[in-house]
Amino acid sequence: MEQRDAQSLADILSVAPWMELEKYVDHLRDRVDVAVLASHARREQLRAEILAENPDLSAQIRRPSPEKMQWAKHLLGTGIVAASDGTLAAVPLLSGTKVQVGVVIVTNTGESVGLVTRVFEHELTSTGDTAREFFDNLRKVHGTSNLASRALMLFGERKLLLAQEADWRMIHGELVPFELRTGVGHPRENLPPVFELVRHYIKDQRFIAVSESPEDLDVLNAGIVLEPGEFIELRTLADDLTGFLDGDEGAGTTKAGFNNLDRARFRAFIAEVGPEVTILLIKAGHRPFLLECHRERVEEAAALFLADALWTRGLPDTGAPVTARGFPFHIDLADNVARTMFKGGEFRTFVETRLMELGVEHGLTDLDPRRTRG
């Protein structure tokens, strides 16, 4: 019988039919417990299988030396460590999209924690001499506004963090996230500032960039074999950026939509900076995270990640299976402050209030109909 990769909808519904809410709730706990326990057992089985099939893999798994861990704790206690994070609020209007970006930089000098806040506001507008041109341009603005807004936030986070005096810097997300790689529809104008920003980070060397949600199956497989406090080198930034530029059939991604000149410039950038950045998979607790750092600072970067994720929170710096987060404290702090100080909902409400106060009929035209419910 032919083995199918995925069940059909009919197959799924035959074993998990629709039911009344009362019947569904009766045994919900039992069904969830079975699934969770099966997941636990499967994780241990997969770890044993992967290590058995790849005996050389164990030799690639490392821990920072005690000396490096002591260095990291000393840095956090007496040096200057800075981390940044931002929030984004975008409100669509008939004329374009109103954008507010807030960035918070947290600096720890050992004895005190400082906060630097910056706010950016702009309107991505549509122009045109005729109604047809206006609406054609408006379609483009709304189609790219989310990408452009996120690119503005991510570039701002990295630019402002670089300007902050620090011994080490912590970036939330990739060093060159997807939004900044694309050039936001204008690679000739938008990529050079990104390239220059990355060059500054690489020249300084003392940075870590931590991503929270690895979805790559290879990454998840590698994460299974790691114990808390361990890390493994996965690839370089060159591998990552080349996959973006040329596409990766295995990962289901298509090549970047650049013209030949922009493609050549991007490839030259990869050759210049790509080998200088190493991408690690690291665990402070049970959850693995991707960490990017300079190739000559791998052990220091791993030690700083673990010390800030564990020791700063009062946990053992060798790894803590009990921690629910296992993520750098300073990045979390910047995120929490940013979300507290720059609430996207408040900006949206303010814009909508002004819409209505400056003319109800015009305001209702711009207002999202879903916002008028109930």
Image (cartoon, helix red, strand yellow):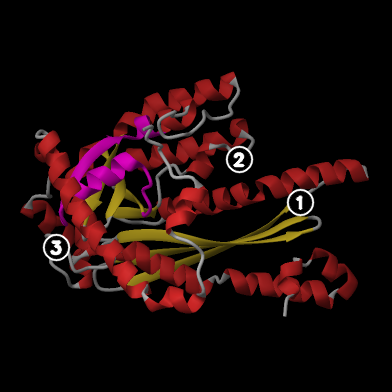
Image quadrant where residue 71 sits = bottom left
Tell me the SS state at disc 1: strand
Does the magenta portion include 227? Answer: yes
Bounds of the magenta span? Answer: 212-240
Q: Which residue is mark 3?
A: 317
Residue that label 2 marks = 184
- In this rendered view, identify the residue nearer to me: 298 or 53: 53
Pointers 3 and 2 in contact (C-beta within 8 Å): no
Q: Which residue is mark 1?
A: 125
Label 2 near label 1: C-beta < 8 Å? no
- Mark 3: amino acid: Asp
Lower sequence index among marks 3 and 2: 2
Whole-number angstrom distance, CA of label 3 to CA of label 2: 41 Å
SS for tag 3?
Answer: loop
Percent across and percent down for residue 2 are: 38, 32
- What kind of residue is marked 2? Val
